[in-house]
Amino acid sequence: MKTATIILFVQITVFSFVLGQQRKVRVPQGYGTLNEIIRNDTLANGQRKDPNTVYILKRGGVYVLSGTILASGFDLNIEAEEGSGPRPFIIMGFLTGATQVEESFKVFNNLKMKSLHITNVNEFNTYIARVISVDGPNARLEFSDCLIDRSGQTFIRLNSGGSKIFMRNCTVSRMGRPSNPDNGRVIDDRGNLIDSLVVENNTWYNVTSRVVRDGGGDINYARFNQNTFVNIGQRFAAIGGINKFYFNNNIVVNPRFYGNSPTSGTVSLEFNLVGESPVINLDYNNIYYTDAVINAWSYISSQQSTPVIRPPFVAPSNEIYINNASGLIEEQLNFINGPDDPSDIIIESELGESTNVPDWDWTSATSELPWDLVADAYHNFGYSSLTNSYSGSSSNEPLGDLRWFNGFEILWNLKELIKDASNLLQELMENDGIIAVNPAAITQLENEISLAQATADNPATNRSQTASAFNDLKQAIQNAKSSLIVTGIETLAENEIHLFPNPSSDYIYINNIDGKLLSVDVLNLDGVVLTSKKLSRGVCVVELLNYTPGVLVFKFILSNKQIVTKKIVKQ
């Protein structure tokens, strides 16, 4: 990363507002802004201002950490602002004159991250060991639509037991460096119990050691569903003791690419069942090694007396679960733009010196500028619809991460959208004036919520039907918001609303000292709702940076149920 692109010090200004029961704090990009706002978001007595706070980061913004973010005694919730554009990019700064930190985030309570792009390598290419350390018991960790790229040791390290981890629609890449293959993990339990581990609709690739490291702690429940795993070095996963284990509809490519010697007993997936009524289900997966990796093993075997052979996927004692599994295939796929095979890493690691082992080959990456990346990963893992894998899942649909295909959604995404739609409907129903504007849009929203809920509740629903319900409900939400345009209700109340500056190229400030303004929708002249905000008492801000120049309509809802619109010019 070029240091010239880093914003060093900025004046920290916090704009906060309340949405439903959540307090949202917008954090400006810059050096140390996220650290300072989280650390100082307290009352005079040291208590947190609001335990139900969400820190909102700017899309396309660069957030340089001035040290480890410590969250002790409170839940931490960080997400990107609504809309499109690159995820907020979080990177550790170079801490001159101080001991370098070991993790970017250290949490003792619950953690939630949404639509963030985090790297654990600073602008001088120094690797930080861990992205997140969990040091408190029974923490709930939720990650959605996040991209985690590069870390020296691991993404999540559990230093305490009882954690519940949920990762959906996320990408994790380049964990560890090939010159040090003993490091490089996605989740490291450090011998602590994991209560639940749900990994769904993710893509994890280029991991030097393993996606899960077992240090002796058991797992009560684990579900890996609809994931794409590519290029895992020492072994795919060391699960350890587990009571309920569901591993379905996944693609696993090169699960132990270093290979085995003929006398090695190392397997790709290590687990043993513990507890009462244990369950293991390995149905519907595509597990294979690429020709390039197999050829690398052959070359090494020709250069030394000890050959390199293909490792077994599971231990002999667990082969019964493979033999009894349905829908297992071994099919090589040509990804649209997959990462380079680790052939050079394999050969140099076996025949050369560890100091000469190359790093991950990133020449095929779609972008080398992380703060500009809009895609779900630096590579594209879509594949041909003519393959067996495309209809190889338990619902006769694609295996692996469904984000790489159009027309498919996981059920969790639909359920989350139903929650959003229901919250919007409740907000609209509480205001009779809004309902009178366009009752047809409200009725459509009610109907689509019911249809979506029926789809979600039907155990026979497949991913295509889920996607159809998802898109219909998403359109109904947009229609309901667009229907709130009012052009004929401007009254004298308009004169009581003060916006400044107008025109503006970046921010509009709203004077709401008396608290009469409840909310504002920003629309373009076509009636499309660009953003919606609840307004708190005081001076509120609306950001315009992501909007194209032209006329925008600000539609306000007042405490007396009146609706007023004003126009501003975005320069």
Image (cartoon, rainbow, N blue to C red):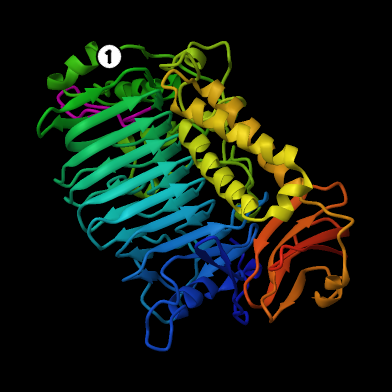
In the image, residue 259 lies in the stretch drawn in magenta = yes
- Tell me which corner region of the image, top left, top right, bottom left or bottom right, holds residue 293: top left
Q: How many marks?
A: 1
Q: Is residue 243 above or below residue 155?
A: above
The residue that disc 1 covers is 325
Hey, which residue is sitting farthest bottom in the picture?
Answer: 44
Q: Nearer the viewer, residue 547 or 482?
A: 482
Placement of the N terminus among the 4 image quadrants: bottom right
Identify which residue is drawn at 24% across, 30% down: 245
- Measured as percent of width and height from the top left, residue 284 is found at 37, 17
Residue 124 seen in render: no
Placement of the C terminus among the 4 image quadrants: bottom right
- Tell me which corner region of the image, top left, top right, bottom left or bottom right, holds residue 288: top left
- Measured as percent of width and height from the top left, residue 400 is found at 46, 26
Q: Amino acid at mark 1?
A: Ala
Q: Nearer the viewer, residue 106 or 315?
A: 106
Q: Is residue 528 above or below residue 379?
A: below
Identify which residue is drawn at 75% across, 50% down: 529
In the image, residue 564 lies in the stretch drawn in magenta = no
- Measured as percent of width and height from the top left, residue 295 is found at 40, 20
Residue 499 seen in render: yes
Q: Secondary structure at mark 1?
A: loop
Give neighbour class at mark 1: few <14, some 14-19, many 20+ (Cα, 10 Å): some
Q: Is residue 173 above or below residue 75?
A: above
Left of 164 or right of it: where is 362?
right
Left of 332 or right of it: where is 494?
right
Identify which residue is drawn at 47% across, 31% down: 411
Q: Nearer the viewer, residue 503 or 134?
A: 503
What is the chief secondary structure element of the magenta stretch? loop
- Measured as percent of width and height from the top left, residue 123 is found at 53, 64
Identify which residue is drawn at 48% across, 56% down: 119
Q: Which residues are magenta?
A: 254-269
